Image (spheres, grey):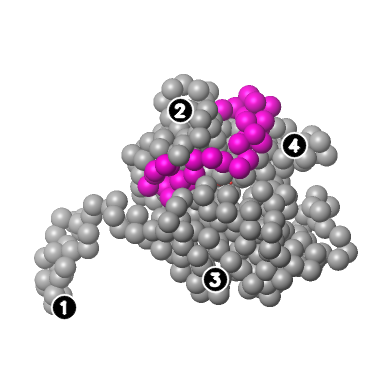
């Protein structure tokens, strides 16, 4: 039988009633790719959960399909979210699919180009504030209490319900939970959702529990520093967040799993971003690569025993942020005329004899 999306596949684990519409863009069912080169170099068994393969190119589709289906079930006419970009793309797409009006509030100048293009294409109404994500979230939370708008940020519990299905897929693919789950942390919804998913599967199937290792960008690392960051800054704009809404859930996940939350610098993120693309042929957006940068850090500090089975979550597609790709790549195309001999000359040194 063909795949019909998350709500259909995992309905026994989701808050689905006979009134919940079977909304789907066939989200989920994303690849778990073994990283052969990096596994060998680092002496571990490393996989990536490639969430960039979702219909709007990020893990947000998992939570959004559930949140929008429930909004529709409850008779809502409009959804609203604050976003660093991916949530707005997913909200706009599922809003369009479900016939709901979609309002998105984003930090001006800090949303990657592809994400902004998506929100506009899917027909969302976009509001750019002179402020950061944390301020935008505060505003939409208040608005949704006072106006007939359904909030679809991850403080909406249906979001985490949908997102926990990624943990199910990892266990389904590996036969049991990995030793370690490495994951980027921004607003901290996703780490909380994965932990919920692993726990629920374990209770039902005895599938084991991973150690949860979360990674924040150094300039936006409130959980690591145990203090709100007023002006978060990082090249990884998706996780440019200084006061995560699911802070406590994230702490619970790392404490219960004997894991941790650590930070990685922008340089380390960019290094991992390039390494992944060049060595493994996997293109993920910068924020996603904080999980790989973090794994490399744990390997270097001897915190991952040889052979440890690690799944790193790559939360968003590299194509979301073409500007960062172009800005951080040092090799440019060689300009050539339309003459074959000029091309042959220009290629000298590239072609093996
Ligand atoms: N990676 C990407 C690509 C993201 O877009 C986000 C969050 C995260 C990681 C962090 O996930 O917030 O659950 O800890 N993006 C949100 C947005 C904030 O608005 O798209 P988290």
Q: Earlier in the sequence, mark 4 or mark 3?
A: 3
> Element at badge 2?
helix
Residue in view at x 50 percent, y 23 percent: 303
Label 1 beta carbon within 8 A of ligand 1? no
> Mark 1 highlights which residue?
338
Label 3 beta carbon within 8 A of ligand 1? no
Kindly indicate whether the residue at mark 3 contacts the one at mark 4 (C-beta within 8 angstroms): no
Q: Earlier in the sequence, mark 4 or mark 1?
A: 4
> Element at badge 4?
helix
Residue in view at x 80 percent, y 66 percent: 73
Q: Which residues are magenta?
A: 231-260
> Mark 3 highlights which residue?
125
Label 4, label 1: how far apart the Cα atoms are: 60 Å
Using the image, tell me which numbered label, if any, was put on residue 199.
Answer: 4
Which label sits in the foreground, 3 or 2?
Answer: 3
Kindly tell me whether residue 86 is visible in this rendering: no
Q: Is residue 211 left or right of residue 231?
A: right
Label 3, label 2: how far apart the Cα atoms are: 44 Å
Q: Earlier in the sequence, mark 1 or mark 3?
A: 3
Label 1, label 3: how far apart the Cα atoms are: 45 Å
> Mark 2 highlights which residue?
299
| Residue 124 on image: x %, y % | 56, 71
Indicate the quadrant where residue 102 lies.
bottom right
Residue nearer the viewer, 245 or 181: 245
């Amino acid at each position: 039988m063909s795949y019909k999306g998350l709500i259909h596949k995992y309905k026994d684990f989701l808050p689905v009633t006979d009134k919940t519409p079977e909304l789907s863009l066939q989200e989920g069912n994303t690849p778990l790719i073994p990283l052969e080169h990096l596994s060998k170099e680092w002496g571990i068994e490393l996989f990536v959960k490639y969430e960039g393969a979702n219909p709007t190119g990020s893990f947000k589709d998992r939570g959004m399909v559930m949140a929008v289906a429930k909004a529709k079930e409850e008779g809502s006419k409009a959804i609203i979210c604050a976003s660093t970009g991916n949530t707005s793309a997913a909200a706009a797409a599922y809003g369009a699919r479900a016939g709901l009006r979609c309002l998105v509030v984003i930090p001006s100048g800090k949303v990657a180009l592809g994400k902004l293009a998506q929100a506009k294409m899917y027909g969302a109404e976009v509001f750019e504030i002179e402020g950061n994500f944390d301020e935008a979230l505060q505003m939409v939370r208040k608005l949704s209490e006072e106006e007939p708008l359904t909030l679809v940020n991850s403080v909406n519990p249906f979001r985490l319900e949908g997102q926990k299905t990624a943990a199910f897929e990892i266990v389904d693919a590996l036969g049991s939970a990995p030793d370690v789950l490495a994951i980027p942390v921004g607003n901290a919804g996703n780490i909380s959702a994965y932990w919920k998913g692993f726990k629920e599967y374990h209770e039902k199937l005895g599938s084991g529990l991973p150690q949860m290792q979360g990674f924040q960008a150094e300039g936006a690392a409130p959980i690591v520093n145990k203090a709100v960051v007023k002006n978060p800054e990082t090249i990884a704009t998706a996780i440019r967040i200084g006061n995560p809404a699911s802070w406590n859930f994230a702490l619970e996940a790392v404490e219960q799993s004997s894991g941790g939350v650590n930070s990685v610098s922008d340089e380390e993120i960019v290094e991992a971003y390039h390494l992944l693309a060049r060595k493994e042929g996997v293109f993920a957006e910068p924020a996603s690569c904080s999980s790989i940068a973090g794994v490399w850090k744990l390997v270097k500090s001897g915190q991952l025993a040889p052979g440890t089975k690690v799944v790193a979550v790559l939360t968003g597609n590299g194509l979301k942020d073409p500007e960062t790709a172009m800005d951080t790549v040092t090799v440019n195309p060689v300009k050539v005329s339309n003459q074959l001999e000029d091309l042959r000359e220009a290629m000298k040194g590239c072609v093996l004899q």
